[in-house]
Image (cartoon, rainbow, N blue to C red):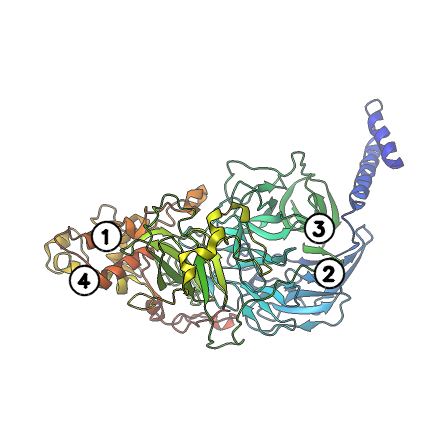
Amino acid sequence: MAELMQVSRRLAARHKQPLSEDETRELYFAVRRIKREMMLRNPVIDFTGLLFIDQPTPAGPVNPEHEAIHRMGITATPGGRLLTLEGLHPGGTVQQLAPAKPGSFWAPDLSFDGRSLLFCYKAWDEKSFHLYEMNLDGTGQRQLTDSHYDDVDPLYLPDGHIIFTTTRGNSYVRCGPFIYSYTLARCDPDGRNVYLISQNGEPDFVPALMSDGRIVYSRWEYTDRPLWRLQSLWTTNPDGTNTQALYGNRSVWPDHLSEPRQIPGSRRVMFSGVGHHDWWSGSIGIVDPDRGSNFPEGLTKVTADRPWPECSAPPVDPIEAADYHSSGPFTGYKTAYPLSEEDFLVSARGAEGKFRLYLMDVHGNRELIYEGAHNVLHAVPLRPRAIPPAIPSSVDWPPPGPGPKSVEPGVFFSADVHDGVPQLARGSAKWLRVWQQDHKTYSTWRKAYRNSGPAVSIVQEEAVKRIVSVVPVEADGSVSFVAPAGKSLFFQLLDEDYRCLQTMRSFTGLMPGERRGCLGCHELHSKTPPGALRGTGVPPVNEPALHERDAHATTVLALQRPPTPFSPPSWGTESVSYERFAQPVLDRHCGKCHQGAGEARRILDLTLRPGVDVFKEPYLTLIGGAGWGNPASPDQAGHGIAGVLPVESIDPTTNDPRGYDVLPPMQSLSYTSKLIEIARSGAHHEVKVEGEDLQRLIAWVDACGPYMGEEELRAQGDPDFPGIELLPIRPRVATAPVVERP
């Protein structure tokens, strides 16, 4: 305090007596010394040591800064170090815990007692990341996992198990055939019995443990929505049950809410807002799920000197602290570790291009803690921490290991599918269709058309889709049905003619034996009715926002009978494609006039014939303007009469949130399709398509018009090119594996 008073007097006196350059420098360092001492005396700094990595930036021929590429083993740059720092002052002692030979690291985790740590490491002469554990003093290192797949970002769980992300699902990003998808998994403390607990086909990112025992992470998805901006925050139980949206599933600002960590003593979550193609130019933000679940409600930006990268400026940009100051030029903030509502550790990049470790607060005050040789990331305090409650597993786990396995299904129920869809007349929904999106375990490695490899649709970078069940909606709007576990599922509400009234543009899923209650149709993936989880040890999410009628879930009609068993359509569960679902119907019912010598052929030719690349006509014409870059002429009769969703029609550079929002009911797909209306009405030259033919045509439209299904893809053969044998996992198409999750 005495030094502070002395410096204050000198600062006040400088107006009367100008200071020399040396005196100014001396005074500046005195101010900095006092400020640093004040920050380090903060009671939340109850530790003297830190664990972190010092890691070179990934490198590779194809955008190693991409959110889903930078963590792959094939882009890892050797030279990383796993370090501890004892002492937060300039004389602190650094200890290198690993590696013994050059390699790369991502996020480590400290045990609850602070005595051991988990980390992922890829040696320079290996192809993939593996999980390891060691004592904090560097002794007792043991390798936990070993495969050709990447295992990264491990976490200790309260019950002793380990959560991490892995590419063991053998799935590839739909818009990047050379990008492996790493998804959430868990294993035993010794690394055995690995189970995939996520149904995602795209990547899950950097999980963290919350105070209530759940896992928070970010996930990328694009179920019939543009592929660019949906990297939102989700939570799940450690066994993969009760997966729920936390924030941003209908937001485009920020682009990707990455590296989330819960603020101590709060339900708020701090994150780094990064870019889809730029993992490193992050800006720190906070979301409060009690104030909202989508932009701008509940969102504040901490580092006001940095924009949300890649996405355009938002219409509003709430700041956490109005008095924030930047303290110099910084070009990115990463891997924040909140210590309190105001204080956090953070990696910040200056103009010279590498990340240093800082102690910072929401007002912009910051003190340099450590500068490494490369990028100092993922710092955590070296101290014991409270063990969150262990949420008991309710999963009926199948036998571990590769090969076919019998996976117990689960059950979905909703007290009322009309909740949240006020425009939908009560009683209009008669059926609920359950779609499965196959995980993309196939790849050509190189882009075959647009961003796809192989291409499935002209509309979007599409998944193979199949209908697994069509179940009745009760008179009160309730449903209860059996659904497959380990699959990526979404739902559609249908009218009495099986036309789509409302579609869900996100995916959900079940773990084996999971019984899951949900609210409404468009929110089936994100909320749970009050009371549905009582007695399970799982805290309810967003409960105050739910409708009171769902509190009486035990009285609804669907729960007064057993769940509807699997009820596939008449053709079973074959995947949907144009040449198997739509073209044969056109041949049978429209060919007389629109094919061969038919007079209407000159107006609209419905003959199957070459088009562009893998896509034939009349597929391109029927899809029309909904196709992404579709070359079909808009002047052609029949252009766009299929009526599928124009998923990628909004320019991603405009960041228009309308492309990601919930669609109004009865405004799209088969309900408004001109093709379906012509086929079913009998008004077009007395042509009336009925029965299975009509249902297959409707299914193709409601699948959003895919061109290929699994059968067509597997007929293409496997890729082969120079260097394919050097890849950690050989890409396949015809012989691509079917990986049963979990």
Badge 2 amino acid: Leu
Nearer the N terminus, badge 3 or badge 1?
3
Query: Which circle, 2 or 4, is nearer the viewer?
Result: 4
> Any mark on residue 675, and which?
1
Q: Earlier in the sequence, mark 2 or mark 3?
A: 2
The residue wearing badge 3 is: 357
Q: Earlier in the sequence, mark 2 or mark 1?
A: 2
Looking at the image, is mark 2 or mark 1 nearer the viewer? 1
Nearest to the observer: residue 282 or residue 672: 672
Position of residue 412 in the picture relative to residue 475 (left or right): right
Give the residue type at disc 1: Leu
Of labels 1 and 4, earlier in sequence is 4
In front of the other: label 3 or label 1?
Answer: 1
Identity of the residue furthest to the right in this view: 2
Nearer the observer, disc 3 or disc 4?
A: 4
In front of the other: 51 or 31: 51
Instruction: Estimate the x, y position of residue 151 in percent, counting from the top left.
Output: 58, 67
- For disc 4, the marked residue is 587
Mark 1 or mark 4, whichever is nearer to me: 1
Q: Residues within 10 Å of mark 3 (few under 14, many from 20)?
A: many
Element carrying mark 1: helix
Mark 3: amino acid: Leu
